[in-house]
């Protein structure tokens, strides 16, 4: 039965990761879940360690910490069937405003932490010749015209790109990689506690301030997406024999797909005759 499958979920103490973890446990799956603080994870999930639940305190930027978490999961459950790379956070600021350290820290969690998980879980998935991997990107990992979000957006584009390549690498081992692009879901992601603002602020970037204010003051709390329904869908798609490489979530995400595709078509057609005259 699918409910006997073992899921590994990172960033499980809040947001979509928490919704997935709680839905899996309620359905009878076995779950190893990670957070920076085990106590916060246990409090959020509402249960302590059990036969089906392994809460793990992990620093995703520390490869040894990640490796230990995977080893502990295998020691308890014997296998890992589905991986959800969900951990991440939003760094706000225009490119000119953000320091090198701020951007690198954002990428350390959103991209390099994810790579640490893939690097250390893949030997198990490859050996068992099976597995599903969800890398949580964002609709902002497909369409990037959000001023003031460049660090977060670019990190999510990186997640989408590496997932495409990972999916091609892993497929010969019957391991399926999927980039997940959620639209706006009603989690705490847009709260001030979940977003970091660049230390440097320049008055000239009013468009960035307006975009940030829109997200935090108007969209926050009014997101159309239901995280529980997203969790249910991800569980269902993990049962598909041939899951997609790209999975968009939400009606708003689908609308933004059309906006991006139309914009790309207009750009490519406008200079097609010149751009295609560059061959030998």
Image: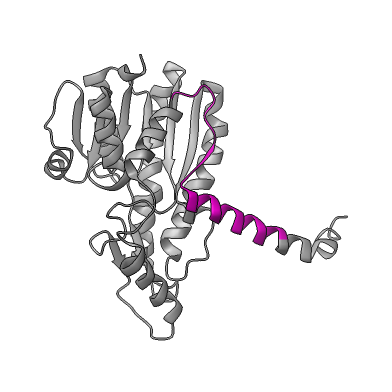
Left or right: 211 in relation to 13:
right
Q: Residue at x 39, y 48 (%)?
A: 112
Q: How many marks?
A: 0
Q: For residue 261, which quarter of the picture?
A: bottom right
Q: For residue 202, which quarter of the picture?
A: bottom left
In this picture, is 184 found above or below 207?
above
Q: For residue 49, which quarter of the picture?
A: top left
Q: Nearer the viewer, residue 54 or 23?
A: 23
Q: Position of residue 183 (x, y in %)?
A: 44, 52
Residue interval drawn in magenta? 239-265
Q: Position of residue 177 (x, y in %)?
A: 49, 33
In this picture, is 85 found above or below 93?
above
Left or right: 264 in relation to 107:
right
Q: Position of residue 69 (x, y in %)?
A: 25, 32
Q: Is residue 257 magenta?
A: yes
Viewport quadrant of the C terminus: bottom right
Residue that lies at the very extreme toward the bottom in this rendered image: 203
Viewport quadrant of the N terminus: top left
Residue 157 visible, this orientation: no
Q: Nearer the viewer, residue 195 or 247?
A: 247
Q: Residue at x 38, y 63 (%)?
A: 103
Q: Residue at x 12, y 33 (%)?
A: 47
Q: Is residue 41 magenta?
A: no
Q: Nearer the viewer, residue 75 or 181?
A: 181
Residue 181 visible, this orientation: yes
């Amino acid at each position: 039965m699918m409910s006997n499958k073992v899921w590994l979920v990172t960033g499980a103490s809040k947001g979509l990761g928490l919704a997935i973890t709680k839905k899996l446990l309620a359905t009878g799956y076995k779950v190893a879940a990670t957070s920076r603080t085990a106590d916060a994870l246990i409090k959020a999930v509402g249960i302590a360690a059990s036969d089906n639940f392994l809460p793990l305190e992990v620093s995703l930027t520390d490869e040894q910490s990640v490796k230990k978490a995977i080893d502990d999961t295998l020691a308890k459950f014997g296998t890992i069937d589905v991986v959800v790379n969900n951990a991440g956070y939003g760094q706000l600021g225009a490119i000119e405003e953000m320091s090198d350290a701020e951007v690198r820290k954002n990428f350390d969690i959103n991209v390099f932490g994810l790579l640490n998980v893939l690097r250390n879980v893949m030997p198990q998935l490859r050996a068992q010749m099976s597995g599903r991997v969800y890398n949580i990107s964002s609709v902002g990992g497909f369409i990037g015209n959000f001023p003031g979000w460049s660090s977060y957006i670019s990190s999510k584009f990186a997640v989408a790109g590496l997932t495409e390549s990972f999916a091609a690498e892993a497929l010969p081992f019957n391991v399926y990689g999927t980039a997940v692009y959620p639209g706006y879901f009603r989690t705490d992601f847009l709260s001030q506690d979940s977003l970091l603002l660049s230390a440097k602020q320049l008055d000239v970037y009013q468009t960035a301030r307006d975009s940030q204010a829109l997200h935090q003051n108007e969209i926050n709390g009014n997101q159309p997406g239901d995280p529980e329904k997203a969790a249910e869908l991800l569980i269902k798609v993990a049962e598909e024999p041939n899951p997609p490489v790209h999975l968009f979530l939400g009606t708003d995400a689908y609308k933004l797909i059309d906006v991006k595709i139309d914009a790309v078509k207009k750009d490519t057609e406008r200079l097609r005759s010149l751009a295609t005259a560059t061959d030998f």
